[in-house]
Amino acid sequence: MTQHLAEPTTGTEAAAPEETPGWWREAVIYQVYPRSFADGNGDGMGDLAGIRSRLPYLRELGVDAVWLSPFYASPQADAGYDVADYRAIDPMFGTLHDADGLIRDAHGLGLRVIVDIVPNHCSDQHDWFQRALTEGPGSPLRDRFHFRPGKGEHGQLPPNDWESIFGGPAWTRTENPDGTPGDWYLHLFAPEQPDFNWDHPAVADEFRSILRFWLDMGVDGFRIDVAHGLVKAAGLPDMGHAEQLRLLGNQALPFFDQDGVHEIYRSWRKVLDEYPGQRVGVAEAWTPTAERTALYLRPDELHQAFNFHYLNTGWDAGALRGAIDVSLDAMRPVGAPTTWVLSNHDVVRHATRFADQGPDQGLRRARAAALLMLALPGSAYVYQGEELGLPEVTDLPDEARQDPSFFRENGQDGLRDGCRVPIPWTAGGTSFGFGDGGSWLPQPPNWGALSVEAQNGDPDSTLELYRHALAVRREHPALGAGSEVAWLDDVPEGVLAFRRTSATRDFVCTVNTTGEPVRIPAPGRVLLSSAPAAVNGGEVELPADGAVWWEA
């Protein structure tokens, strides 16, 4: 059932941080995966109380906002992305009072709060869906989902050939109240996650109400899960072939990135604009091109979209430059900021993704990639633990895994648990300071050396590199918002170099993506480097897989 605050909270709505024009255009936003950030009650699972206790750490790190992955009431079939009640907190994470306190504390520290919203699907335990099943064929509630009769003489085949992102068919057959086989329902993800039918006005009305509920609580915006998936092609046409997941983000699909989604986000923008404090919408939109992503960011739609085209680019100077140019070019016509991201809760951590020749190389590249990302114009996203240089955990035992796609065939790789292992806070102790009761996924025994405690104050640590970089980014007038970089082409192959200008000071970023040191003319005074860079006689030796920031 929907939770309500048991008693009025003191004071008025939690005051947002001081307003600056278009704050999201240059914000650094830190993703918190609530299960794995901090455990406040010692049950081995992260929670809102734990997050609240660690907010000063995020303030000291230097980020502008916190994005929280789902904490709503849920059976947890897909780590909370199967929502049973969008206005309630799951007891494993706390209560609405905890959420209210977290928002207030964050605002008191100058941090904005963005929360996940999951509009493509809900939990099969959602009240609407349960009533649709109980009432059987003819229930008006079935029109709020995609119920269809099956094909074949006895309806024994799915209504079409769509495949679940998690593997297997995207349809599950129901049982009628009298026990006979019934209609099928659509779920683009797990069977426990039925898709909403956004052609039904009640669905649109409900989500506008949900947005207002959380905006009234004081949140500063929403990250929209599967923002590209809400509208399906009319008639739900067959794809005509298998292995459909391979096409995700590469070509148009009848269940993703349909033009009808834009009317939904225009209506959401009106809701966001009703509230003071520049509340924002951020799209998780997998599209075939950066230009298609830009359509979600037209002036009357959303404010930001994740840049998956950049995230999926390898450690290669030419490919990175191409992705940067394409991203900036696509956002410029709609006046939206480009976003940059290296890792999140669904992909292999970049310290491992870049490690062609082992973990030392992966960490060097990850540190350099962080300086490159934070030097680019626009907004950046940091996934919890990347500031510690955490690698992917690749040796989790099968019995510990919880990713639903791990248990299905022909879907995602099923290994998302490896980037979700709870992060280490202390060099020793129970779960390295995550909490007093162990951790829901096992942590590697050597993670104490990567903990916040071990890295704090060490000038060579990745944590201090991030702190320093974020401080420079915030202070330097040429960094942050913008839409242009000026490439410096007189550099060796494998080196990226660009200039960003301001009215008072210029900035240059140089990145060596090769495995060997490279000498180039020093473009100015060193501000920060991911690895030692020797400047001598007007030249600098860029370190292998290293990045240097310059005052030019």
Image (spheres, rainbow, N blue to C red):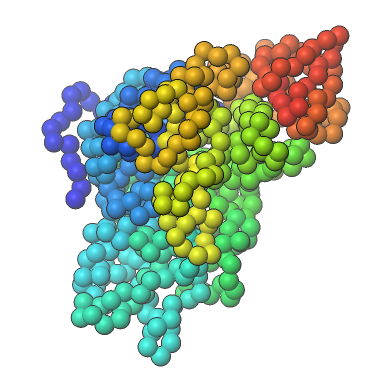
Q: Nearer the viewer, residue 95 or 464?
A: 464
Above or below, 360 against 183 in this view is above
Q: Nearer the viewer, residue 185 or 220?
A: 185
Residue 249 x, y percent position in the rendering: 60, 55
On screen, residue 77 versus residue 381, left or right, reads left
On screen, residue 49 versus residue 246, left or right, reads left
Quadrant that contains the C terminus: top right
| Residue that lies at the very extreme toward the left in this rendered image | 7
Above or below, 64 against 207 in this view is above
- Residue at left offset 59%, top offset 73%: 241
Residue 88 x, y percent position in the rendering: 24, 44
Above or below, 75 against 418 in this view is below
On screen, residue 484 versus residue 242, left or right, reads right
Which quarter of the picture shows residue 187? bottom left
Q: Is residue 255 something that shows in the picture?
A: no
Count of marks, rendered view: 0
Above or below, 273 against 15 in this view is below
Q: Nearer the viewer, residue 343 or 497?
A: 343
| Residue that lies at the very extreme toward the top in this rendered image | 537
- Residue at left offset 42%, top offset 56%: 404
Residue 69 x, y percent position in the rendering: 40, 41
Residue 469 x, y percent position in the rendering: 59, 20
- Residue at left offset 83%, top offset 25%: 518
